[in-house]
Amino acid sequence: MQRTIFTDDHHAFRDVVRQFIAKEIVPNLPDWEAAGCIPRDFYTKTAALGINGLQVPEQYGGGGIDSFLFNTVVYEEIGYAAASLGGFQVHLNTVLPYFLEYANEEQRDRWFPGFADGALVSAIAMTEPGIGSDLAGVTTTAVRDGDDYVLNGNKTFITGGINADLVIVVARTSKDPENRRNGLSLLVVESGMPGFTRGRNLHKIGMKSSDTAELTFDNVRVPAANLLGEEGAAFKMLAHNLPQERLSIAITAQATATAAVDLAIAYAKERMVFGKPLAGFQNTKFVLAECATELQAGQALIDQALIALDAGTLTPADAAKVKLFCTEVQARVIDKCLQVHGGYGYMTEYPIARLYADARVTRIFGGTSEVMKSVISKSMGL
Ligand SMILES: Cc1cc2nc3c(=O)[nH]c(=O)nc-3n(C[C@H](O)[C@H](O)[C@H](O)COP(=O)(O)OP(=O)(O)OC[C@H]3O[C@@H](n4cnc5c(N)ncnc54)[C@H](O)[C@@H]3O)c2cc1C
């Protein structure tokens, strides 16, 4: 079905991005996967194309665009190329929005130019070894001492944690016995601050070009000037920003599953079984028809959600529905497309194998499918 959310400007931008991805990502992805991270100069290359600063205000060297549709084009094209650049996407889709929404004038002057020109890479650290889904249970503490907060705690699974210059850390600054959600704050920890150390780059079954780290904060003195937004109000800020993060995950899920169907169609047309192309069997046609139908439904949901996001009306429950549906569809579709590839689909030299491994985490990070169901059911008064 025709998508109606994009203009000619988006289409022209898409062409440029597609060419860039073909030249800069596709041939390099195996090396980046082996290295476990994306090289820093990738960020300056995308910045030169205007990608990093799309939403950064113009006075800081950005594009000053409010709409999320240009970002959508970028992440769709990365997915269509059967790639998932976790650290890059978290930097721009998840972390930058916190700065755009909550940074004060002084912080904007300090950090926005680096976002726009690719000099800065960022991450967000919510999860701890003992706390993931239950975010209000964060145990990392930040105690005010003069002009600083003294930060102590451990975070884990932090995407971009190895590469990042700036890490937004969720820490407890006070306790409210009435409501655990009160008293959490966002502090921006900078590379090189004494007491801030990074553990190893964690080994994952997929998303291998994305660095994922354990971070330790041992009496890190974080200047109060690095408090993002209001002290004690982090839970509200996270709840406000999570819908965009969840929609971004859905967009990548949808695009990578679309790539999987394209790969399966191409493979099925070439592979000969029992003397004829695999694509000639009714089972192959029906399986791929089911995939295309589920993807069509996912696309309609995403496009509707993108309109709502731009209008400022995307609710947490609606974003949760989109993430839940699209990531579950992604899992089903990619699994079926791998099956079409037979044994070759299990070999890592085939992109479908990478898509299969990369896809597993989309039902976990950004909130698990079970957490999405909790958010949705709460909105239903349950
Ligand atoms: C590759 C990767 C990258 C990540 N990147 C980041 C990052 O950049 N920053 C960051 O802060 N975090 C990141 N995470 C962490 C991620 O968000 C968490 O793993 C996720 O929120 C789940 O938390 P957990 O792993 O502690 O699982 P748990 O919360 O321990 O959950 C375990 C299981 O219990 C289920 N469960 C939990 N609560 C309920 C409930 N109330 N009802 C029913 N079932 C429930 C869950 O759905 C899950 O199936 C990343 C994780 C991965 C794997």
Image (cartoon, helix red, strand yellow):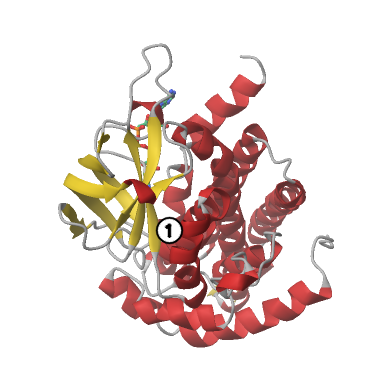
- Circle 1 residue: 358
Residue 145, above or below 266 = above
Secondary-structure class at tag 1? helix
Question: Seen in the image, is 75 located left or right of residue 117?
Answer: right
Residue 193 visible: yes
Question: Does residue 7 sit above or below 150 in this rendering?
Answer: below
Position of the C terminus by quadrant: top right
- Give the residue displayed 43% in from the left and 16% down from the top: 179
- Image quarter where the N terminus lies is bottom right
Determine the image quadrant of residue 142.
top left
Would you say the beta carbon of the disc 1 residue lies within 8 angstroms of ligand 1? Answer: no
Name the amino acid, label 1.
Asp
Residue 290 in the image: state x and y as whole percent.
69, 51
Left or right of 324: which side holds 318? right
User: Which of these two is toward me, 8 or 229?
Assistant: 229
- For residue 175, which quarter of the picture? top left
Q: Is residue 274 visible?
A: no
Relative vertical location of residue 79 with respect to residue 308 in this rendering, above or below: below
Q: Is residue 244 above or below residue 269?
A: above
Within-10-Å neighbours for mark 1: few <14, some 14–19, many 20+: many
Picture residue at 43% right of the left edge, 24% below the top: 182
Q: Position of residue 161 (x, y in %)?
A: 30, 58
Within the displayed image, which quadrant is ligand 1 positioned in?
Answer: top left
Query: Where residue 348 sits in the image (x, y, percent)?
Result: 36, 69
Residue 367, percent across and down?
47, 38
